[in-house]
């Protein structure tokens, strides 16, 4: 667990038994177990928050990169037909827009 062997753990238990006594040792063990559990949950929450923060930063940088790539692209050419001056009323635009899925 923490690099402790069987003899080290046994020594710690014997010292705890001598310090706290047989009546108080179960209560101290429960309190220690609860504290360690809470510490573990807090550490897990901290790790999750760090991972979430990293993901948010990655998302923001990707969005910024996409915005710059889109800004650098050429805008679509204006519609220019020989037979019309108003591109909105052009029949070729009307047929193209009908073919597009809604």
Image: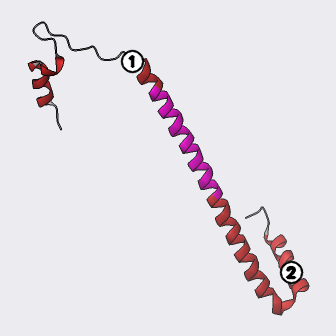
x%, y% of residue 29? 76, 81
Q: Please tell me whether residue 41 is drawn above or below residue 11 in the rendered image.
A: above
Within 10 angstroms of label 1, few (less than 14), some, or many (20 or more) residues?
Answer: few
Q: Determine whether, in the image, residue 12 is placed left or right of residue 86.
A: right
Location of residue 98 (image quadrant): top left
x%, y% of residue 72? 43, 18
Residue interval drawn in magenta: 46-67
Residue under the point 73% across and 73% down? 35
Which residue is denoted by mark 1 in the rendering?
73
Residue nearest the observer in this picture, 61 or 6: 61
x%, y% of residue 64? 50, 30
Q: Please tell me whether residue 71 is drawn above or below residue 37 in the rendered image.
A: above
Outermost residue toward the front? 86
Q: Determine whether, in the image, residue 15 is placed left or right of residue 54.
A: right
x%, y% of residue 83? 9, 8
Residue 90: image tag: none
User: What main secondary structure does the magenta stretch of the protein show?
Assistant: helix
Within 10 angstroms of label 2, few (less than 14), some, or many (20 or more) residues?
Answer: some
Outermost residue toward the top? 82
Q: Please tell me whether residue 78 is drawn above or below residue 25 in the rendered image.
A: above
Residue nearest the observer in this picture, 42 or 10: 42
Which residue is denoted by mark 2 in the rendering?
16
Residue under the point 75% across and 80% down? 31
- Helix or strand or loop: what does disc 2 sit on? helix
Residue under the point 76% across and 76% down? 32
Q: Determine whether, in the image, residue 21 is placed left or right of residue 45.
A: right
Q: Please tell me whether residue 85 is drawn above or below residue 49 in the rendered image.
A: above
């Amino acid at each position: 667990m923490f690099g402790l062997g069987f003899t080290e753990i046994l020594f710690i238990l014997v010292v705890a038994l001598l310090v706290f006594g047989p009546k108080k040792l179960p209560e101290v063990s429960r309190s220690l177990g609860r504290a360690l559990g809470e510490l573990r949950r807090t550490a897990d929450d901290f790790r999750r928050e760090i991972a979430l923060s990293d993901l948010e930063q990655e998302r923001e940088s990707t969005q910024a990169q996409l915005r710059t790539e889109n800004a650098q692209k050429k805008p679509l050419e204006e519609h220019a037909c020989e037979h019309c001056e108003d591109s909105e009323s052009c029949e070729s635009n009307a047929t193209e827009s009908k073919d597009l899925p809604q």
